Every structure is written in C-alpha cells, then in structure tokens.
Amino acid sequence: MLENWVVTPTCLPLVLRRCHACASDRFRANGKFRVSANHKLLDAWLLVLCTGCGETAKLAVLERMNVRSVRPELLGRMHDNDLGLAAELLQDPVVRRRNRIALDWDNAWRLDTGGSDHLDREAVDIAVRFAARIPVRPVRLIAEGFGLSRAGVERLITEGNLVSAVRLSGKLSGGFTFTLKR
C-alpha cells in the first residue's frame, strides 16, 4: 500500500539579499505590497523587511505596465496585501531572477506523514508530494518521517534497503517515491 507524505510551507521563506543599511543578508516578507500609478503606467513591489535592522526593500513585481494590461483580480489582491499572492510571487522564477534573490526555506516547512504506523510491515512504499516548490534534501525528509538520523538514512541507502528512482542526495522540490525495506 502506497502512503502519502506532504511537504507544506508553514510560513513565507526568508529572502536572501544584501541589505544596503547593515551587513544582514536576510529579509522577511510580510505580504505587504506597494502599488504606484503614473498616468496609465503601473509599478508594483512586494515589500520585505531586513531581519537585522528593519529596513524596507522593494522587490519589483510589475514595472511600467499599462494599467489596462494588469488583471483587475491581481491588482485587487495587491491592494488587499494578499499573503497568498506574496507566496506565489516569491516562488516565481521570473520575479526571483529580476530581483536577484534566493529563498531560504529553513524552518519554513513541515512534513505531514499522515500519522500512519508503518513499523510493522516488511516494506513501505511512500510517495512524497510538495505543496510548494520547497527545496529539501530527501534524506532529511526520510529521516524526519521515520524518526531516524540522517546518517542512519544514508546507511540504509548504501545497504540497499532504501531505494528510489530519483537520486536521494542533493535537494528536490518535486514529488518522488521511495521504498524502505526492513
């Protein structure tokens, strides 16, 4: 029987970017937007706060867009400071590239194993699904899900008792499956 594990975000990730006011390189997004219109042209930014000094920085979301070309629903969500929109935009590769930022997902996600008891079976098949593109090491997920150390998971891999079609070293942000044999 295939069990499902889900990796879900618990909060917005930290934004990795250099602060101009202090030596910090981490910013916290709180879902606040700034929208500015100049005649028929619109600019919009996601505001982020430096974790060191509290300085505000702006991440460009829309630049010099014609007002008519922006979906009213998107504009409404920005005016409402929609936290879900902030999460979507932080994961958008175009926004990240344009603003030259990276994301720090440490302590911003959790693993839901469904609470099933899999200790009594000979082999366990598990499908891991990601609710958002969160880069996590599969070894860390498996260790957390089974209550093992990461070294213990590495040992299971080298012994051939933990197998997967994907490479379990490195980071993944997409779903994968694995089998653990006892």
Image (cartoon, helix red, strand yellow):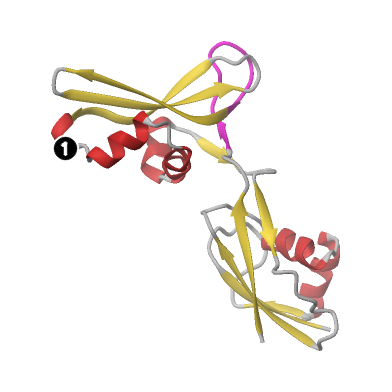
Quadrant occupied by the N terminus: bottom right
Quarter location, residue 175 = bottom right
Q: Nearer the viewer, residue 47 or 101?
A: 47
Q: Nearer the viewer, residue 16 or 31?
A: 31
- Magenta segment includes 24: yes
* Residue at figure coordinates x 72%, y 63% from the top left: 139
Return the x and y of residue 94 as percentages of the image width and height.
36, 42
Please indicate whether residue 69 sits to the left or right of residue 73 in the image: left
Pointer 1 local density, CA inside 10 Å: few below 14, some 14–19, many at least 20: few
Q: Between 46 and 23, which is closer to the camera in this rendering?
A: 46
Does the segment drawn in magenta span residue 83? no
Residue lying furthest top: 21
Determine the residue positioned at 57% across, 10% down: 21
The residue that disc 1 covers is: 69
- The percent position of residue 13, horizontal first and vertical second, equals 58, 39
**Amino acid at dot 1:** Ser
Q: Residue at x 53, y 30 (%)?
A: 30
Helix, strand or loop at mark 1: helix
Task: Residue 105 in the image: state x and y as whole percent.
Answer: 62, 44
Magenta stretch: give its range.
14-27
Numbered disc total: 1
Q: Residue shown at 46%/45% (left/top)?
A: 91
Q: Quadrant of residue 126?
A: bottom right
Q: Height in image: 152 above or below 104? A: below
Our reading of the magenta stretch's main secondary structure is: loop
Which is nearer the eye, 112 or 124? Answer: 112
Q: Quadrant of residue 120?
A: bottom right
**Is residue 122 shown above or below 107?**
below
Q: Say which quadrant the C terminus sits in.
A: bottom right
